[in-house]
Amino acid sequence: MADRSVTPSAPKLRTILALLALNADTVAHLDQIVEELWEHNPPGSPSTTVQTYVYQLRKLLARGVQDAGGVTVLTRAQGYEFRLGRDCEVDVRTFEVLLERGRRALDQGRTEEAAQLLRDALGQWRGPAFGGVTTGPLLSARAAHLEESRKSALELRFEADLALGRHRRVVDELAGVVKAQPTHEGFSAKLMTALYRCGRRVEALETYQRLRAEFVAQLGLVPSAALSDLHQAVLTDHPSLLLPDTAPVRTALAPEPSAETEDALEPAMMPITVLPLPAQRSPVAQVPPASFHFVGRQAEVETLTELLGSADAGNRPGLRMVEVAGPPGAGKTALAVTVAHQVRKSYPDGQIFVDLRPVNNGEADLGDVLAEAMRAAGVQMPAFFTGLGYAFRAWSAEQRLLVVVDDVMSVDQLDSIRPSGPGSAMLVTSRRRLHSPGVTFAMEVPPLSTEDGIRMLAGVVGQERVHAELQQAAALVRMCEGLPRLIGAVGARLAYRRSWTLAQMRHRIVADPSVLLRISGNAGLRETLLGNYHSLPELARAALRAVAGREVDTVSAAELAVLLGISVATAEDLLETLADAYLVEEVLDLSPGASTRFRVTGHVRELTDGHELPAAVLQSGFSTSPLPSASLVLDSEDAVVDHGPAGRTLTG
């Protein structure tokens, strides 16, 4: 206000004032105000109650207005308008305007001006967004957005200051920010840069190691390729980290103090803070770092390297597309990433990496994921998703690229990301057999051998512990069915529990085999298996539930046909569909006249035993026919499989 601070004491009044101020000079609709104040539990007459609150707010504001330049709350047809007077401003708007101006100045190379604008923007903050205000859904969402904008402004300000050579000034502030935001890659990268430029190289490396440990512990991930590149550059004193010899661009803003000027002229033998954006990197290098614990797979690596990295590949017409399929957790991604790094020199224009797991998990849209990868590679983006394929083909027509697409569930997902340049190739991983008509070579990734599994376990928990309990290590690998994801999860659990023996872990798994599904992470084997299950047609899901509900381990097409009341040919197709999704496996019987049988895989059996697959309604009746009759109700959510007196029930 003009002469005094006006702060409502009642919580509801503070909430209304915050919402109106946030929408200053526009109408805040009545239904928005009601939702913010009471969400799903409004009083009997919410509009009348809001009118009372607005009346009280007007009285409070009137006492704080000393001239015509104050603010007014106006009643409108659909709500209320918070009208700003002359010389009045809302700090949120001021912050956002200064942030945008600072970002634009930095993009245009006006570094000094950008640093000052961003400093002014951050000066608008006096605590958390809407501090002291009881927030509902609208203000909570806005507060989260503002907090992210605040981080962005702070990161850009550090970027500008470091580009101006002010690393000694900001290094302590950066250390505090990184401690408060231990998984923020941008802050950690700038702290590494500032420390290195201050001659504290060891501390810069320690910053990366702490960040990596946080990522592994909290997220089960490793830092991005950009941060790994910075780490490698610090290790090797790479020339690309040197500051340019030219002085920073100066603007008409007031000059900095003399001490600041001395900082700006520090020796140019230190690394620059601004990492190049992926769109500016040449060649494109989006493939993530190879796994440190990758073992075995020598034959597979050699085969794929020969297919994708051969010298005459550029002379071959058509797109080479290699499909790597295998059960969930088999290490397909690690294999593809390892091979991609080995053949990098065969693709002078770079490598694009697309991870479709967020799409298949329902967390992201296919168009958004593809557009993000293309935009990072420098592709000029069309206005609509339907134009992505055309834009990518036009961009890649004169380039030789390797496109790696991870976790493909449908051939249709590849349509917009196929490169058209001569000598380009695609390396596709999938947890189901795609049977793509355009595939050049299809490879199925088997589980690790016991020997390789032990080597992987030793790499995680240490050679001494594994060699001291070699038989227990072999048993753990077999319990994991040779799947690298599970072996890594078991190893990670043991690595943090130094007092545990391998025998203790084995006994725990024997007592509860489903523990393997639980410790494999948030995006672990359990979620992947369930994703494969839910991607199936309903009849195939019903077939899996029926097979898993049997006492007998294996089933033939004829037996499944009886269970579901369908033809043998349809049952064969269903079992093949389940096998393609790695939910059942074929059991070979070479004896004369034997029919092909299928068995539910071990970890899928654990899901069914844990009642994690919804059951179908399957009523097996009794008749004079030598084969019992059966009927399947597909639209039931709560169901029972009944196989007669000798059967068992599968529920969940």
Image (cartoon, rainbow, N blue to C red):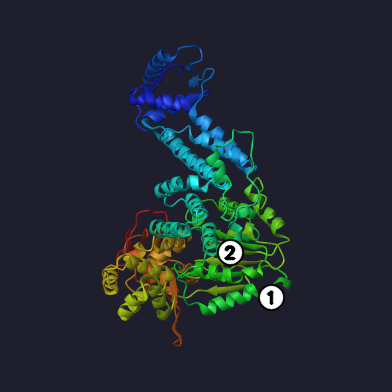
Residue 406 in which image quadrant: bottom right
Which of 305 and 600 lies nearest the eye of the viewer? 305
Measure how far apart labels 1 and 2 are at the Cα level: 19 Å
Q: Is residue 469 visible?
A: no
Disc 1 or disc 2, which is closer to the eye? 1
Instruction: Say which of 14 and 636 sits in front.
Output: 14
Per the image, the residue denoted by label 1 is 311
| Residue closest to the eye, 278 or 33 | 278
Extreme residue in the top direction = 67
Picture coordinates of residue 523, whole percent (x, y): 42, 59
| Nearest the eye: 137 or 598 | 137
Q: Is residue 272 visible?
A: yes
For the C terminus, the image quarter is bottom left
For the residue carrying disc 1, how many other residues have a C-alpha within 10 Å: few (<14), some (14-19), or many (20+)? few
- In this image, 488 relative to 197: left or right? left
Up/down of 91 relative to 416, above or below = above
Please give the residue where the numbered disc 2 appears in the rendered image. 404
